[in-house]
Amino acid sequence: MKPSRALVLTVLLGLVFILPSCTGDVLTPAQRVWLARKGTIQVGVFQNYPTFGFLNEAGEPVGLSIDYWNWLAAKLNFRVQFHPAPFDKQLQGLENGQFDSLAGLCPSPERRARFDFSAPFYTINTCIYVTPARSGVKTRADLKGLKVGVVEGDSSQDLAKEANLTSVSFPTYVNTVMALANGKVQAIILDTPVVDYFIKKNGLQDKIRRIKAPVARSQMSLPVKRGNAMLLGILNRGLALMTPKERQQIEKKWSGE
């Protein structure tokens, strides 16, 4: 006589609860059951935020954040699917359940009111960039009276507003960088990995200079929908397993060093 499907399911779930203790699984039995039922973690990712996340020539999502997610998926044995989307669509998708998480997000007070966040996994510096000929700029206060390029909806826009600067908003990061290179603005405030990538890619070393001292430092974390404690716990357990050497390998790959 064949066992009933209900009995088979009961046995399988029982094994899920027993096996982790035998194999040293870092996840709890309940977390394993949640992942098994979930199937694939859906992650919204950046389309044009190099080197953290962007699309390569084949239209595939690549970057530091993608490598982090792939490492987590391999380490914790789950499947992940990436969905490139504009930044505002990423936030909407996370809020409405289309995405389970995102490539990474800095947990500002406003965002903490909307989402829950993992432990930080990557630090991003935000700096001022000017043309090489411009002197006397060290802080945001020195940008008074200048046209300062920022990205619409980005933290750079908030930083310019806080300092009462005359800002000019652009839709993308590359638009903002090229606006400085082409003289449309006299300075920009942006995250260093992005600007440094476009400087190198477009040969702008003679047109753009970075002010060394950061104006802000942000901690990238993995966001989940408010109240999704199960996935949050899984991500935190995974991030805690990553060694300094493993982090260095991923970050060095995308730093160009």
Image: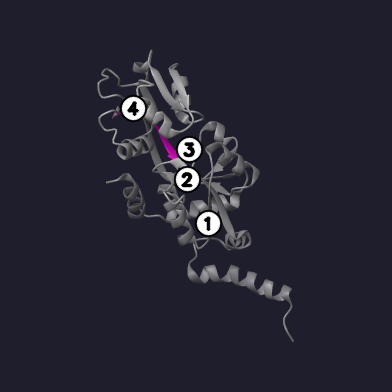
- Relative height, residue 232 to residue 152 (above, below): below
Circle nearer the viewer, 2 or 3: 3
- Disc sitting over residue 181 in the figure: 4
Disc 2 target residue: 119
Amino acid type, residue under disc 1 in the picture:
Val
Give coordinates of residue 72: x percent, y percent: 46, 56
Image position of 39 (left or right of 221)? right
Q: Earlier in the sequence, mark 3 or mark 1?
A: 1
Disc 3 target residue: 106
**Magenta region: which residues?**
212-221
Between the residue at mark 2 and the residue at mark 4, the CA separation in whole angstroms equals 36 Å
Give coordinates of residue 2: x percent, y percent: 72, 84
| Mark 2 residue element | loop
Q: Earlier in the sequence, mark 4 or mark 3?
A: 3
| Mark 3 residue element | loop
Amino acid type, residue under disc 3 in the picture:
Cys
What's the residue at 51%, 33% (across, down)? 108
Between the residue at mark 4 and the residue at mark 3, the CA separation in whole angstroms equals 27 Å
Give coordinates of residue 24: x percent, y percent: 48, 67
Q: Earlier in the sequence, mark 2 or mark 3?
A: 3
- Relative height, residue 192 to residue 96 (above, below): above
Image position of 155 (left or right of 194)? right
Disc 1 target residue: 80
What's the residue at 56%, 55% (across, down)? 41
Q: Nearer the viewer, residue 187 or 119?
A: 187
Circle nearer the viewer, 4 or 3: 4
